[in-house]
Amino acid sequence: MPIPITPSKIDKLTPIKPQGLVVVITGNGKGKTTSAMGMVLRASGHGLRTCIIQFMKGDLYSGEWDGVKLLGELVELHATGMGFCGLQDNRYTREQHRTNAQAAVELAREQMNSGRYDLLILDEINNALKLKLVDLEQVVTLINDKPERMHLVLTGRDAHPEVIELADTVSEVCEIKHAYRQKIEPQPGIDY
């Protein structure tokens, strides 16, 4: 039987030179936002404060909205999106999506400069860039203006090559098989 490890038995490593990282999570597979939320959980365990800004999500409920509330004051989430632009059921115009995404960029800039956060997650910003709801120059400026010790995570499909080049860590989530393609409905807590 395994011996449970309690926090008092674990040494916490501290980097000699703390440095904020730029992390890009991209690809066509399921799990980009989920991976970023795993970082939120891990960061919370170290007492780091996180701000999440969701660029596309906001018109349909997603479990992380209530899940992060359980982490208390360590995590703040802004679901600023109006849904996925260009999808058949989305009722908003491209101009409305762009106006909203521009406001989300401004919010990201404000939160980044507030000094209140150790981790800033820009969920689905890669999609917003691909759809031209935000401009490459805006995303590059956010990356370049990031405070030295702040970690910045950018998620979403189709990450721009320049964003990938600027990142410290890039992961690509690749779909091998998805339940949706087998006509299985999205499941709460797993898919949203």
Image (tube, rainbow, N blue to C red):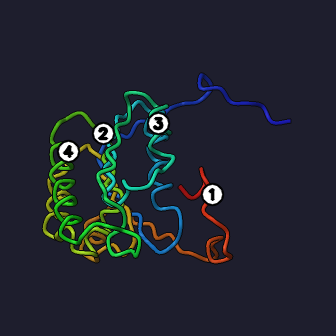
Marks 2 and 4, how far apart at CA: 9 Å
For marks 2 and 4, the one nearer the N-term is 4
Location of residue 149 in the rendering, given as x and y in whole percent from the top left corner: 25, 43
Question: In the image, which is nearer the foreground, mark 2 or mark 4?
Answer: 4
Query: Callout 4: few (<14), some (14-19), or many (20+) C-alpha neighbours within 10 Å?
Result: many
- Identify the mark nearer the N-term, 2 or 1: 2
- Asked if 49 appears above or below 163 in the picture, the reply is above
Helix, strand or loop for disc 4: helix
- Residue 4 at what x, y percent from top left? 73, 30
Q: Are marks 2 and 1 in contact (CB under 8 Å)?
A: no
Lower sequence index among marks 1 and 3? 3
Q: Give the number of the mark in front: 1 or 3.
A: 1
Front residue of 133/11: it is 133
Q: Residue furthest right?
A: 1
Tell me the residue at 27%/72% (across/down): 165
User: Amino acid under label 2?
Assistant: Asp
- Mark sitting earlier along the chain (4/1): 4
Identify the residue position indicated by label 3 in the image.
Answer: 13
Residue matched to label 4: 112
Q: Nearer the viewer, residue 183 or 126?
A: 183
Mark 2 = which residue? Answer: 118
At horizontal 52% and vertical 71% (from top left) the residue drawn is 29
Looking at the rendered structure, the kind of residue marked 1 is: Gln
Using the numbered discs, state the Cα–Cα distance from disc 4 to disc 1 in whole angstroms. Answer: 33 Å
Crowding at mark 1 (Cα within 10 Å: few <14, some 14-19, many 20+): few
Residue hosting label 1? 187
Q: Earlier in the sequence, mark 3 or mark 4?
A: 3
Mark 1 lies on a secondary structure that is loop
Going by the numbered disc 3, the residue's amino acid type is: Leu
Q: Dot 3 lies on which element?
A: loop
> Is disc 3 surrounded by few (<14), some (14 to 19) or many (20+) residues within 10 Å?
few
Task: Say which residue appears at 53% left-offset and 74% top-offset.
Answer: 174
